Image (spheres, rainbow, N blue to C red):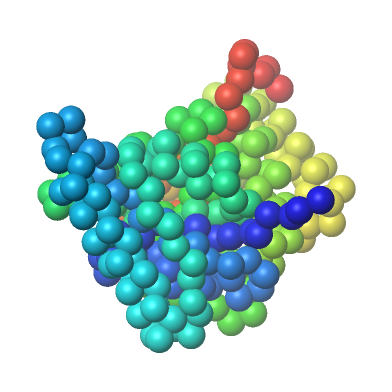
Amino acid sequence: MVTMKAYIVVLWDGTEQSEFAFRHALLMRKKSEYSLLLVRVARKKNFLESKQSFESEVLAEKDATQHAAEALKSKFGVMPEYVVKEGDIKSCLKEVLAENSCSIIVSPETYSIHKGLTVNIVKELSNYGDIEVPMLIANNAPKKVQDSIEVVVPMEYDPEFKDLIEWVISLSRSYGCNFDFIKPVLTGAQPKKELINNIYFTRQVLDDNNIVYGIKTASKEANFIDDIYSFAGSIEANYILTTSLNYGKLRKQAMYGEFPIIYVNPRKRRYRSFN
């Protein structure tokens, strides 16, 4: 039986932000055996465009990505592998995931496909079941890590929050991440009941898998989003982990727009769970 090589994928477009993403991948790699894979997504061929012209452009993209990989090795001491895919961002990434064993995808929030053509990665890749591995969105260089990667996880009352917990286990085991949960103070009867259900589920699953974690209660006076970032700052957290359902809430205020966030898409469901 042939085992596929495991990768941390970096969405590469040659910008400074994609180099920051590469540095986050290096940070994640410190305590893992994963290789790094640069993925360059190039545009699709236009209907009226000549084949020769398009192929020449694709060849230039491949040369540029190869040179980028060599420059990254020279600068950071690690040689990434690389691949160039043609098409839309979602189909190209799905091809990469089908062809390789991938643990996490690291990307800047805005990705450049061609001159003047950019896409918002979160908007493109945040639907139920779209991409089935965590997405690390980072626009700045990573913080220095002493002993471990610190991750804050805001507790959510949505049933889909349970999908996040298996990734807490995976990230803990693969990268040695430490997890600190923060739970909101809710007043509505039904959301409070669902939140308690998610807390119970989280404790049960993480305890059964011997994952070390903490749970903090947010301040009643403070806005929950403000409290999340305040808590993350107080423990010098590297990342916040959330579902794609709540990513927008964490990015709503411009002052929090640069903090790196890992998000996970919930699985597709035929029906909504009541637990």
Say left or right for 15 vs 236: left
Residue 118 % position (x, y) = 22, 47
Question: Is 195 in front, or is 261?
Answer: 261
* Residue at the spot 65% in from the left edge and 36% down from the top edge: 163
Q: Is residue 108 visible?
A: yes
Say left or right for 269 vs 105: right
* Residue at the spot 58% in from the left edge and 24% down from the top edge: 268
Say left or right for 193 vs 80: right
Question: Is 137 in front, or is 50?
Answer: 50
Q: Is residue 229 above or below residue 188?
A: below
* Image quadrant in which you'd find residue 121: top left
| Residue with the most extreme front position | 52
The image quadrant where one finds the C terminus is: top right
Q: Is residue 216 visible?
A: no
| Residue with the most extreme top position | 271
Say left or right for 249 vs 113: right
Residue 52 % position (x, y) = 18, 47
Residue 141 % position (x, y) = 37, 72
- The mark tally for this picture is 0
Question: Is 135 in front, or is 256?
Answer: 135
* Residue at the spot 68% in from the left edge and 44% down from the top edge: 165
* Residue at the spot 70% in from the left edge and 39% down from the top edge: 199
Residue 260 % position (x, y) = 42, 59
Q: Is residue 257 above or below residue 194?
A: below
